[in-house]
């Protein structure tokens, strides 16, 4: 477009229009619909929270008790864990997103199977298993299985919790050390090529990878209190996002990578908040909610 012959008034009007248009586009991006799965507290029932482009929100119940929601890549199914034997046995389940077709996939007695996540193609589920042996020693393990529960296999080289698939099929997890500290690490799906990404002598848990595979959000107590942090997928550019006097935990990326949700007790009860990826514009979404995951 040629503008050299426009009068100053017309040029000013054009610039005003363009600035307004760009602002409208940015505002429109903020109003994109989104879906979050979470555990309603204290009922323990898994709920689905949806917000549409007009800003209206709805909550529907699956009527299923469980926690640690993980969405299948197509959004049609959810993986989660539920507790048995007076909470001594935790098992991984899947169900449709409306709560139908529930299937129990693991049955290991007196083991805590938790933190499931789906592979990018939806054919496999990785999960953490924790238990104490006869001598009282704690064992943090990472397992993988087909999404129907078959071919359960321990990834023996990985000792940790909170496994999460990257878009390229690797696994990010929290490496658990004998001194009770942990570090965010990454490895191939077969447990090879392990790379430790954080080195803080702290407790660092619940890594969540952005949909483009470029960043990891996680929780850490490296500064004395659990806060939300973010870093590049290679461990560079680590940045603290939250500054609260209470525990902030379990971050989850929005589909476009512009926002995060996390759990905080700033009001005395577990509450789901959202914020921009730089830590700005913190907003309360759901009170009495926990273990939330944004559908990507």
Image (cartoon, rainbow, N blue to C red):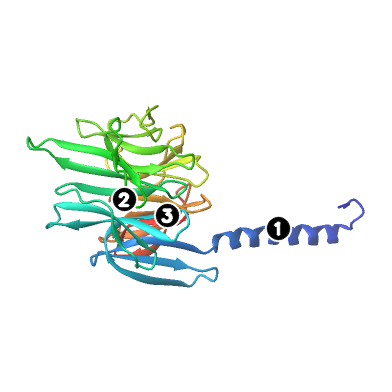
Q: Which labelled disc corresponds to residue 19?
A: 1
Q: Mark 2 or mark 1: which comes first in sequence?
A: 1
Q: Mark 3 or mark 2: which comes first in sequence?
A: 3
In x, y percent, where is residue 155?
A: 31, 35
Circle 2 — which element? loop
Location of residue 244 with respect to 16 vertically, above or below? above
Is disc 1 surrounded by few (<14), some (14 to 19) or many (20+) residues within 10 Å? few
Residue, disc 2:
149
Circle 1 — which element? helix
Extreme residue toward the left, this view: 135
> Quick one: 180 or 136, which is closer to the camera?
136
Please tell me in which quadrant of the rendered image residue 38 appears: bottom left
Residue, disc 3:
72
In x, y percent, where is residue 111?
A: 18, 46
> Quick one: 22 or 69, which is closer to the camera?
69
Q: Residue at x 36, y 65 (%)?
A: 286
Please tell me in which quadrant of the rendered image residue 26 appears: bottom right
In x, y percent, where is residue 187?
A: 39, 32
């Amino acid at each position: 477009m040629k503008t050299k012959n426009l009068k100053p008034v017309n040029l000013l009007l054009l610039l005003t229009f363009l600035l307004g248009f760009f602002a409208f586009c940015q505002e429109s991006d903020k109003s994109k619909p989104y879906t979050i799965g979470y555990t309603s507290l204290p009922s323990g029932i898994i709920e689905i929270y949806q917000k549409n482009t007009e800003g209206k929100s709805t909550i529907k119940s699956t009527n299923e008790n469980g926690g640690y929601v993980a969405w299948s890549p197509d959004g049609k199914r959810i993986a989660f864990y539920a507790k048995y034997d007076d909470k001594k046995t935790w098992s991984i389940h899947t169900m449709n997103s409306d709560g139908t077709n529930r299937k129990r996939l693991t049955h290991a007695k007196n083991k805590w199977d938790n933190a499931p996540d789906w592979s990018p193609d939806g054919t496999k589920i990785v999960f953490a298993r924790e238990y104490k042996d006869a001598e009282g020693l704690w064992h943090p393990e990472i397992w993988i299985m087909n999404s129907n529960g078959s071919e359960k296999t321990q990834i023996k080289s990985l000792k940790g919790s909170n496994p999460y698939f990257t878009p390229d099929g690797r696994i990010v997890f929290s490496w658990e050390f004998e001194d009770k500290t942990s570090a965010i690490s990454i490895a191939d799906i077969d447990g090879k090529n392990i790379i430790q990404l954080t080195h803080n002598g702290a407790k660092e848990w619940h890594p969540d990878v952005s949909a483009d595979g470029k960043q990891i959000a996680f929780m850490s107590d490296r500064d004395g209190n659990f806060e939300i942090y973010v870093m590049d997928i290679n461990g560079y550019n680590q940045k603290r996002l939250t500054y609260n006097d209470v525990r902030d935990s379990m971050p989850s990326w929005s589909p476009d990578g512009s926002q995060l949700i996390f759990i905080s007790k700033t009001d005395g009860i577990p509450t789901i908040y959202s914020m921009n990826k730089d830590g700005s514009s913190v907003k309360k979404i759901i009170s009495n909610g926990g273990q939330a995951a944004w559908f990507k």
